[in-house]
Amino acid sequence: MKIMSNTQGSPCATARDAKPHVRFTGLSAGYPGRPVLHQLDADIPALAITALVGPNGSGKSTLLGVLAGVIQPTAGELRRAGNRPPAFVPQRGAVGDALPLTVRQTVEMGRWAERGPWRRLTRQDRATVDTAMERLGITDLATRQLGELSGGQRQRALIAQGLAQESDLLLLDEPTTGLDPEARERISALLTELVADGVTVVQATHDLEAAHSADACLLLRNGHLAGQGSPEQLLTASTLARIWQPA
């Protein structure tokens, strides 16, 4: 298994003919005694939104974990452009309410990779946090406890934490699930803006509306790649019925 970074890649025929930000070949991964991903070959196009689509158990979250570097592949090769670590935004339910964190403290955690959890943030760090909160429209929530927020507010706080990491690769696990239409639309618009600003976005989603608005899709089924390409090509009624039919 090889993981490489700072590569340019070769021309990619998907999403705006961009060069891939991430390319993996023969990628397998999983957990002790439970393989999940099996021999995946795919590109994540740069400066685009890629949606990972598939039923529960298809391997979407595991693939995000591999891209984030928190799950090590068991086989294959993964190449990634850029030198900064990816920013990973987990599902809202993965962030517990037990810790009495304010919204600002939550966003400040995005700077820990630079400073460590025990070092005081610099003036530049604080400015970065301010900018992320302003961009997500949560400055007025700075002193609120994370557990007190609505689903949409909480998700915006977690995405702001991701933005505070200043990565060129943003990974999101079900960012719009359970949100009202206004919150989903706001997050979708933000992701489009981030791509225009030079960020590559990958989101695992059950939200077919969000998937249709992406630039590229990877379809997963039972840990195998069932298709890759544009949403128009892949998200057809017949293909989705095949992907969601019982194994």
Image: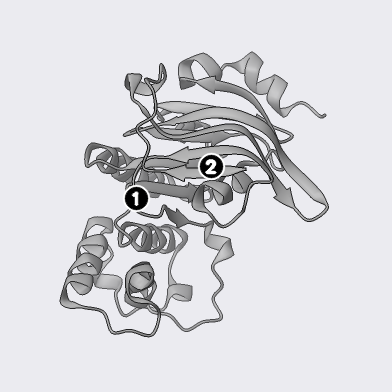
Residue on which the image places disc 2: 204
**Relative depth, front residue between 147 and 111:** 111
Q: Is residue 194 visible?
A: yes
**Relative depth, front residue between 127 and 245:** 127
Q: Is residue 23 above or below residue 94?
A: above
Label of residue 83 in the image: 1
Give the percent coordinates (x, y) of residue 32.
78, 56
Helix, strand or loop at label 2? It is strand
Query: Which is more foreground, mark 1 or mark 2?
Result: 1
- The N terminus appears in which quarter of the rendering? top right
What residue sits 73% from the left and 43% below the top? Answer: 36
Q: Amino acid at mark 2?
A: Ala
Helix, strand or loop at label 1? It is loop
Give the percent coordinates (x, y) of residue 202.
45, 41
**Gap between marks 1 and 2, in whole Å?**
23 Å
Looking at the image, what colour scheme do you see? one colour
Q: Is residue 169 above or below residue 162?
A: above
